[in-house]
Amino acid sequence: MAQLPNAGVLGAQLTFGPDRLELTASTVQRLYQARDRIEAQLLVDRLDRHRIRSAVLGDYLAGAAGELPVDLWPTVWVLEDRDWSLAYEILSQFLSELAAERPSWICRGCGELLPGGFDLCWRCGRQRD
């Protein structure tokens, strides 16, 4: 269900000062439509580590499935135009890491077959070699 970037909506910010009132507008752009809230939050956290302001919209719409249109997945939006290029690079890296799933492994302690996403055996607690 993942969708890649496209332009979004126009946002505005109102700033108050002692002798001025300033209105600045910027384009908020949709970066990524995630499979679920967890994936969206992982991406937002990674963007935040690079000081990129972002937001997740539509994260709770899946609860209305059947009543609303099909496009109900959480979407990550970049809030500042100047961050778009770096955000897209971070997204590309994020997606390549998701695609590079690690192979299953067999625990040397107890012989349990474990999915590649686990670093500890769920049966005996031994760490992956």
Image (spheres, rainbow, N blue to C red):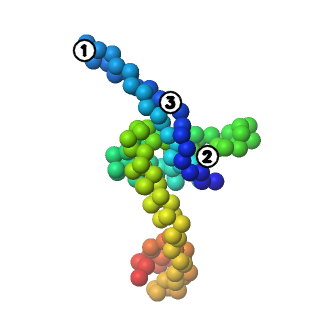
Q: Which residue is mark 2?
A: 73
At mark 3, the secondary structure is strand
3 or 2: mark nearer the eye: 3
- Of mark 3 and mark 1, the one earlier in the sequence is 3
Q: Is residue 113 visible?
A: yes
Picture quadrant where residue 74 is located: top right
Between 77 and 84, the residue placed more toward the observer is 84
Q: Indicate the position of residue 61 as horizontal and vertical percent values.
A: 62, 40
Image depth: mark 1 or mark 2 in front: 1
Residue 122 in view here: no
Label 2 secondary element: loop
Farthest residue to the right: give it. Answer: 66
Residue drawn at x 48%, y 36% as measured from the top left: 28
User: Toward the viewer: 48 or 128?
Assistant: 48
Q: CA distance from mark 3 to mark 2?
A: 21 Å
Confirm or deny contact between disc 3 and disc 2 (CB under 8 A).
Answer: no
Q: Amino acid at mark 2?
A: Trp
Residue 104 % position (x, y): 54, 78
Q: Residue at x 53, y 71 (%)?
A: 101
Marks 3 and 1, how far apart in space? 27 Å
Q: Is residue 85 above or below residue 95?
A: above
Q: Quadrant of residue 24?
A: top left
Name the residue carrying label 1: 18
114 vs 82: above or below = below
Nearest to N terminus: mark 3 or mark 2: 3
Return the residue at label 3: 10
How many residues crowd around disc 1 within 10 Å: few (fewer than 14), some, or many (20 or more)?
few
